[in-house]
Image (spheres, helix red, strand yellow):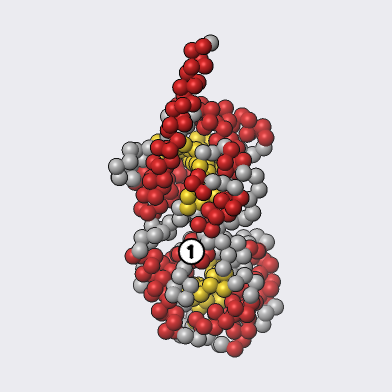
Amino acid sequence: MSDARSLRIIHSEAATSFGGQEHRVFKEMVAMRERGHYLEAVCQSDAELTQRLREAGFVVHTLDMDGAFNIVRGIFKLKKILLAGRFDVLNTHSRQDTLIAAPAARLAKVPLIVRTRHLASPIGSLLTYTWLPHRATTVSHHVRRQLIERGVPAEHVQAIYTPVVLTPRLEHSTLRDELNLSAEAILVGCVAVLRPNKGHLELINAMLPLLRTRPKLHLVLAGGGSPGFEQLQAHITHSGVSDRIHMLGTRRDVPNVLAGLDIFCLATRQEAMGTAFLEAAASGLPVIGTDVGGVGEMMRPGETGLLVPLDDAQALQSALIQLIDSPALRTKMGQAGYQRVHTEGIFTTETLAKRTECIYDQWLRDLRPSLHAESVLSQQTTDRH
């Protein structure tokens, strides 16, 4: 660990599903523990994150967080937990858990309360970014700029990228064997949950003319989600090339799927960061993405992949053609992306932990004078009575 002292940190998360946000919380807690800090969490009892964190050896407190009644009850229950745990930092992650955990931390006088924003959607109330927490972090510089433009002081918000866990490059993928495809087949693929804002329909429509004119070309979609899966399947069935669009559903072997592709494309409509692009680059794939949110920060346009404007079907198709028809360009961009992710250290769990540690330490030092003044004033008021 660095010269910074070991911290006692507690994270709160209201979501019960396990997506990118919850995976970030998990990776951050593991990484910070490896740096010598002590961590606990507060989640809902039926959350998948609760189970995963406990399996990893963390103490997880459970609270019902849905509804106004649970907010009030949760504040006073959590206050007791925070007082007993003597935590230095509370880090919240969703609006609902911030409404519970941040007031509880204020009452328990936790020195530093941080809210992390994981989304690129429009920001409504600043209550859970400025009034309740002391500071805020974001998963990309794009989201940081959103908060600043909305009114959060620039010095009160910092960007900390979500990391990718790097694994050895697979020598062989079973994907082509599974789909009964030859080594000569060209596979464009996308790995993402099947939601409308992920742009699967736009990708399919851009690929259809290319599939009809290039017999070795295939599109592979990995990801689950209802009714997205059924809606896309119906669209594909009537395309005339359904035999060359492969819907894999939810996969637990994402590195294996990526290793079987030639090109990664995600025509996302909204993205705070876009770790899928990093995971693809880490597998040695050239990437194509839409210029929204933090996507441009995940690649070097023209070097590791191609960035196209949102809702520009022609630009998306042109980018696909560039890479489909040029094996040399695919190799060049894929190698550049692989080198960036694996050697520059920007998106590693160690970098996440070091940067988080540094930011926490700085903010704690910034806040201590005011916290000390509050403590003295409180003691003087008590003495007078």
Residue 285 visible (yes or no)? no
Quarter of image, res 372: top left
**Looking at the image, which is closer to me, 195 or 307?**
307
- Judge whether 243 appears above or below 122 on screen: below
Quarter of image, res 143: bottom right
**Which residue is rendered at x = 67% and y = 32% of the image?**
69
**Looking at the image, which is closer to me, 14 or 293?**
293
**Which residue is rendered at x = 69% and y = 71% of the image?**
234
Q: What type is the residue that disc 1 sits on?
A: Glu
- Judge whether 100 appears above or below 148 on screen: above
Q: Is residue 169 left or right of residue 193?
A: left
Q: Is residue 173 left or right of residue 240?
A: left
Count of numbered labels shown in the rendering: 1
**Which residue is rendered at x = 57% and y = 27% of the image?**
76
Residue tagged by mark 1? Answer: 297
**Residue lying furthest top in this view?**
385
- Judge whether 72 appears above or below 159 on screen: above
> Where residue 118 sits in the image (x, y, percent)?
54, 52
> Where residue 126 sits in the image (x, y, percent)?
62, 44
> Where residue 249 sits in the image (x, y, percent)?
57, 65
Q: Which quadrant of the rendered structure holds the N terminus? A: top left
What kind of element bears circle 1?
helix
- Judge whether 88 appears above or below 196 on screen: above
**Looking at the image, which is closer to me, 115 or 33?**
115
**Which residue is rendered at x = 36% and y = 53% of the image?**
350
Residue 304 visible (yes or no)? yes
Q: Residues within 10 Å of mark 1 (few under 14, many from 20)?
A: some
